[in-house]
């Protein structure tokens, strides 16, 4: 019940009932409304601060779960990074060393994964700092894995080349020890049997019986299989690749054709005495980048002792 208000009227010397104007009543009502709203808002803020709503509780729980999941993901990324570091170390210090390849610098393996703006989108998200860190770690790991994959491609190519080279480089005698009568003229200067002057002998002469099989000393491509216009007689030249060639001269017959691919140990012809020759033998040359080198350096199937015995038993006789 609204209390009535009275005021003293000095003219009538009586207390008279006072009535407020409409404006006064409206102002008073507005003031009470504002106070009520303010008090209600304050109560709501205090309640939501002290007591989470079901929706906010669910959201907070989701954020916590995601932070835990991101933490676990980061641990797995770090574990993978440590395992990759072991592989990188083995690649640099073992695989690339074996194949005589340059190691990959750390600056290349680590590389760059973009500027700050690349990860700016994570800043406004809940747990943005953690998200950004995980994203950076994943990008670094991805780059390192890419570099390592490329390195393994290089090592695979080197291994394939090395395997081919092992089979192609001259590595055996062209005449088996069992069928060899003797070594006649080694590599180096000697007296030419025809003009009796000092002349460089660019190969080695193997003496054996007429028709003794002659074998390719490495895998390769036959580039010459014909009668020589010079003094080599019937000859075969094999290109082994990697800068290596071998020549087999003075043969009685040829067992291969030009353009044919041969394997180490395959017969390429028979021993004879065609061309500029004084007797049955094989003149054998090894050329590296078209320059003759000592064939004895490429006899992996002959021990040092066996080679010394061959030289000791050699009868230095100029055959070509």
Image (cartoon, rainbow, N blue to C red):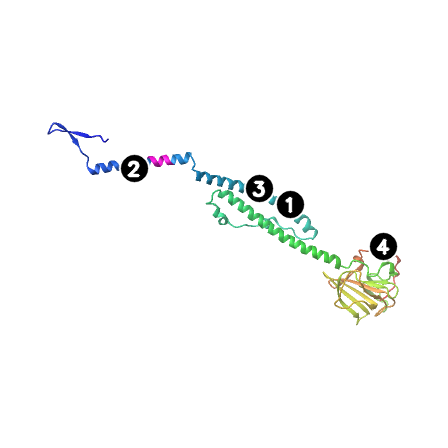
Tag 1's secondary structure?
helix
Q: Residue at x 35, y 37 (%)?
A: 41
Q: Is residue 239 magenta?
A: no
Q: Which residues are magenta?
A: 39-44
| Label 4 – label 1 distance at C-alpha | 45 Å
Query: Residue 232: in sight, yes or no?
Result: no
Tell me residue 112's x, y (percent).
55, 50
Tell me residue 135's x, y (percent).
53, 46
Q: Residue at x 67, y 54 (%)?
A: 156
| Label 3 – label 2 distance at C-alpha | 55 Å
Kindly identify which residue carries mark 2. Answer: 34
Residue 86's label in the rendered image is 1
Give the foreground label among 1 and 3: 3
Q: Marks 3 and 1: in contact by CB < 8 Å?
A: no
Give the foreground label among 4 and 1: 1
Camera-side residue of 51 and 128: 51
Give the foreground label among 4 and 2: 2
Q: Of label 3 and label 4, which has the lower sequence position?
A: 3
| Label 3 – label 4 distance at C-alpha | 62 Å
| Label 4 – label 2 distance at C-alpha | 115 Å
Q: Is residue 253 above or below residue 137?
A: below
| Label 1 – label 3 distance at C-alpha | 17 Å
Give the foreground label among 3 and 4: 3
């Amino acid at each position: 019940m609204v209390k009535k208000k009275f005021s003293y009227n000095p003219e009538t010397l009586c207390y008279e009932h006072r009535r407020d104007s409409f404006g006064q009543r409206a102002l008073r009502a507005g003031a009470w409304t504002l106070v009520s709203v303010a008090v209600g808002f304050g109560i709501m803020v205090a309640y939501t601060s002290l007591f989470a709503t079901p929706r906010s509780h669910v959201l907070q729980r989701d954020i916590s779960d995601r932070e835990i999941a991101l933490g676990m993901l980061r641990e797995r990324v770090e574990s993978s990074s440590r395992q990759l570091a072991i592989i990188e170390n083995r690649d640099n210090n073992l695989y690339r060393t074996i194949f005589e390849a340059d190691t990959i610098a750390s600056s290349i393996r680590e590389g760059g994964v973009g500027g700050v703006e690349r990860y700016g989108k994570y800043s406004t998200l809940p747990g943005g700092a953690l998200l950004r860190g995980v994203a950076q770690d994943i990008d670094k790991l991805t780059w390192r894995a890419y570099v390592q994959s490329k390195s393994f491609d290089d090592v695979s190519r080197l291994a394939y080349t090395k395997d081919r080279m092992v089979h192609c480089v001259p590595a055996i005698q062209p005449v088996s020890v069992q069928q060899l009568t003797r070594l006649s003229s080694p590599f180096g200067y000697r007296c030419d049997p025809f003009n009796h002057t000092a002349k460089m002998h660019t190969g080695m002469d193997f003496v054996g019986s007429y028709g003794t099989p002659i074998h390719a000393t490495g895998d390769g491509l036959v580039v010459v299989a014909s009668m020589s216009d010079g003094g080599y007689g019937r000859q075969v030249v094999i290109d082994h690749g990697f800068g290596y060639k071998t020549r087999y001269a003075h043969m009685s017959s040829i067992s291969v054709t030009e353009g044919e691919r041969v394997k180490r140990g395959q017969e390429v012809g028979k021993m004879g005495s065609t061309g500029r020759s004084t007797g049955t033998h094989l003149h054998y040359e090894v050329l590296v980048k078209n320059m003759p080198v000592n064939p004895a350096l490429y006899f992996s199937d002959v021990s040092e002792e066996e080679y010394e015995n061959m030289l000791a038993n050699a009868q230095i006789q100029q055959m070509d």
